[in-house]
Amino acid sequence: MKTVFEPTKGMTPADTSYCPGCTHGIAHRLIMEVLDERGLLGNTIGVVPIGCSINAHHFMNIDMCESTHGRAPAIATGIRRVHPDKVVFTYQGDGDLASIGAGEIVHAAHRGEKFSTFFINNAIYGMTGGQMAPTTLIGQKATTCVSGRTVEQAGMPLRMCEILSQIDCCVYAERVMLTTPANIRKAKKAINRALDVQLQGLGFGFVEFLSSCPTNWGLAPKDALKYVEEKMSAYYPVGVFKKPEGID
């Protein structure tokens, strides 16, 4: 019989450890699928820090390195400089990248480090129990703001694509959603663009994925996806914020 579909060799056969409805698994699959299609699995090194993303090495069938909390960009910088022939990426959540790792990611972009960052923004600390993150929306409830985040208490949520795109040597920044088949196809295209930027040695590339966290949001998976599309994307608009000429 004719084979019409095969799993990507970029994913291991391990059962997922993510909560039902979590879109980390979709992001994993897309990144590994792109690397597989481009023949890069054997030439790629991924770096993951503390957070739900720390489980990625169980599922991504490539060389992986774990970092301390927030320090994935520093580790990736060292790896890429020592191995300039390798494809290097960090895979980070918002509690990591936008909080304890904010300085790391800003200065990696400022230096124009030639790796790619894939940023999962689910507006909450997922691994440690649902605390407020720098990306938690105004009015959104968390275990450390049970009545909802307020501007007076915590300021406005950080928009990382907007922040990093203002840095000269961040040459590519795009925000996508992991909600519908159409949006997932756009996310895959963004991953390809980030890799094109890196392979051409143009500078730092950043892709932000608006993602759901049904468990810590207290929503059913379907309702969590609706929350991403109606609430998160209203404050975090999707689209290309910065792209070099010649990158489709």
Image (cartoon, rainbow, N blue to C red):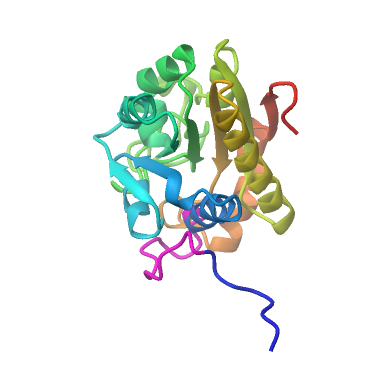
Asked if residue 159 can be seen in this view, the reply is no
Image quarter of the N terminus: bottom right
Most extreme residue toward the front, as rendered?
85
Q: Residue at x 51, y 62 (%)?
A: 21
Q: Residue at x 60, y 29 (%)?
A: 197
Most extreme residue toward the left, as rendered?
68
Specify the segment rendered in magenta.
9-24
Q: Position of residue 40 (x, y in %)?
A: 51, 48
Residue 77, located in which quarter of the rendered image?
A: top left
Q: Residue at x 65, y 36 (%)?
A: 193
What count of labels does the image hold? 0
Q: Main secondary structure of the magenta part?
A: loop
Q: Position of residue 66 (x, y in %)?
A: 27, 42
Q: Nearer the viewer, residue 150 or 237?
A: 237
Image quarter of the C terminus: top right
Q: Nearer the viewer, residue 152 or 223?
A: 223
Q: Position of residue 187 (x, y in %)?
A: 64, 45
170 part of magenta stretch: no
Task: Answer above or below: position of 106 versus 101.
Answer: above
12 part of magenta stretch: yes
Side (left or right) of 119 relative to 37: left
